[in-house]
Image: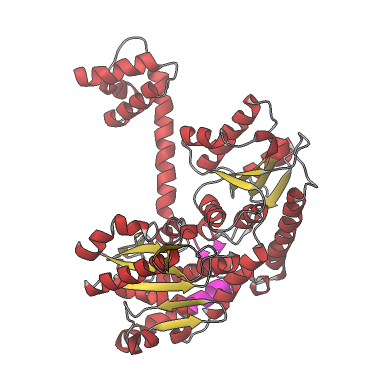
Amino acid sequence: MKLYAQQLVRYPEMGISLDFSKLPLTPEFLAEMQPLIERAYADIKSLESGAIANPDENRMVGHYWLRNASLAPNAELKAEIDRPIADIKEFASRILDGSIQAPSGRKYTTALIIGIGGSALGPELVADALPNTGLKLAFLDNTDPDGMQKVLDTVPLQETIAVVISKSGGTPETRNGMVFAQDFFRKNGVAFAPQAVAITGCGSKLDKVAEAEGWLKRFPMEDWVGGRTSVTSVVGLLPAALQGVDIDSLLKGAADMDAKTRCTDTAHNAAMKLALAWYKAGEGKGKKDMVVLPYKDALVLFSKYLQQLIMESIGKKLDLDGNIVHQGLAVYGNKGSTDQHAYVQQLRDGIDNFFVTFIEVRKAAHDQVLVENAFTSGDFLQGFLRGTREALAESGRASITISIDEVDAYSLGMLIALFERAVSYYASLVHINAYHQPGVEAGKKAAGIFLALLQQVRDALASTPETAGQIAGRIGADEEAVYHCLVHIAESGSATWTQADCACRDTFAK
C-alpha cells in the first residue's frame, strides 16, 4: 500500500488518477532525469508561447491554445480560435433543430465525414466514445473504393451533410473520398455542393472549390494545428457538435488537464510522470511497446487514436542535433477483457518487450443485472482488470493504470490532453521534434512517383504482347515496378486489361 500511495498521482476534483506502482519512478531515477525534466518543462513553455515548433513548414504548434484562447500569443490568433467555435455552435444548433434543412426539405439525420489520419481518427474516437443525440456519423477515412462504397450505401443521401476535412485541400486520400462521394451523389440524383461543408485552410484548393461551387458552409482550419492534435480544433469540434456532444465540456476537460500538467512539480504532474514512465520502460530508446487496454467498450478506438498521436510524433530518424537515433514508441491494443482471450497470453508468458497502460472506468450506467451469484458484469470486468494487472506483475511485466470516473465529454477531453502533453514532454526528454513528419511526406512522394509510372505504363501498352522487362526497357523504368503496374492495371478492370494481362503472364513465361 505504501508503494501504491507513493506512486499515485490523483486529481480528485477532475475524477482521474494514475497509478505507477507497477512501473515505479524511483527517487534515484527522477534525480538522474532531472536535467532532462527541466529541459522538457522549458521546451513546452516555449512551445505554448508561440515558438516555431515545425521548422520544416515554419509553423507554430498551438493546439493547447484551442481550449484556452487567452494563452494564444496575440489577439489575432485568439480571434482565430474564438470565432470558429462560436460559428460551430450556431451552425450545429441550426442543423440539429432543423432551421437549416437539406435541399429536399428534410431535416438532416446523418453527417458524412471525409478525412484521413487525424482528420478522421479524432472525430471517430469522439463519435464512438460518446452518446449520439444528434446526427448519425459515417466516415470515409481511406481511399479504398470498396470501403467507400460500403459506407455510402448506408447513408440516406437526401438527409446527409458531407463534411470534407483537408488543410491544404490537396491531400490525395481526402480528395479521392470527396470525388468518390460526389460521383455517388450525382449518380443518385442528389446535388453534392448544397449539402457539403469544407473544413480547410483559408485560400486552399478545397476552399476555392467550395466557394466556387456554392457549398453550404466553409470553416477555417488553423495552420498551426497538426492533424494528430486537431481533435479540439474545428476538425473535431464540428463533427462532435453535429453529433450532439457538449463541446464546451470536451474543451474544459482538456483545458483543466493542460492547467494541471503545466506545473513544474513533477510529483504532481501526471503528463510528465507518464512521459517518464515511457522513458524508463523503454530505456529512452523505445525498446518496449506500449499496449493500451481500456476496460470499456466506449474507448475501443483510443489505442488506434494513440497510435497516430504517439507514433507519428515520436517515430523519428534524427534528433534535434541531426544525429541518427531512430526513436520510436510502438502502440497497439484493443480493449479488456477481449484481449485476455487474444494476446494477453503472450504478454504474461512470452517475450517481455512491452508495458501495459490499463484504463479503468469506475462507473457503469447499466450494471444492475446479476450474472452469477451476487456479481454483475461490471464486477467481472473489474475482476479481469485487477486480475490481469496482478498476473502480469507476478511475471515481472510493467504496467500503468489510469482510472477515470466515467466516459463523458469532460473525461475524454482530459485523456486527450493528458497524452498530448505526455508526447510533448517525452519528445523533449529524448531530444526529438514531435511536430514534423518527414516519413509521412516521403511516403506521399513515393506514391506520386508510382502514379506517374503507372500512367507511363498505361500509355506504353500495345496490342503486341510484351513482358514487363520489355516495356521497362522501352520506357527506361525498373522492371519490378513496371510489373506491379501491370498487375494493378490487369486487376482493375480497365480498358487495357487484355494487354496488361498478357504482359503479366508473359513476364513469367519467358
- Vertically, is 147 above or below 352? above
Q: Is residue 348 above or below residue 275?
A: above
Q: Residue 393, image x and y in percent?
A: 26, 74
Q: At 73% from the left edge and 50% from the top edge, which residue is drawn?
A: 96
The residue range painted magenta reads: 42-62
Please say whether residue 46 is one of the residues in the magenta stretch: yes
Q: Is residue 422 magenta?
A: no
> Residue 247 appears at what percent x and percent y?
65, 62
- In the figure, is residue 256 to the left or right of 194? left
Q: Is residue 66 visible?
A: no
Q: Position of residue 383 (x, y in %)?
A: 36, 69
* In-image side of 27 versus 57 (left or right): left
| Front-lying residue, 369 or 113 | 369
> Camera-side residue: 161 or 492?
161
Query: Residue 333 lies in what quarter of the image?
Result: bottom left
Q: Nearer the viewer, residue 364 or 97?
A: 364
Q: Residue furthest front?
A: 373
Residue 253 coordinates in the image, percent (x, y): 59, 71
Tell me which corner region of the image, top left, top right, bottom left or bottom right, holds residue 206. Answer: top right
User: What kind of colouring is applied to the model shown?
Assistant: secondary structure
Q: Would residue 49 be found to the left or right of residue 207 on screen?
A: left
**Residue farthest to the top, as pictured:** 464
Image quadrant holding the N terminus, namely: bottom left
Residue 463: quadrant of the picture = top left
Q: Give the residue drawn at x 23%, y 65%.
A: 348
Q: Would residue 243 be seen by someone viewing this image from the given angle?
A: yes
Q: Residue at x 32, y 9 (%)?
A: 464
Question: How many circles with numbers are drawn on the protein?
Answer: 0
In the picture provided, is 363 more to the left or to the right than 31? right
Task: Looking at the picture, tell me which residue is in the foreground, 103 or 71.
Answer: 103
Say which quadrant the C terminus sits in: top left
Taking the spot 63% from the left edge, 57% from the top edge, the residue there is: 237
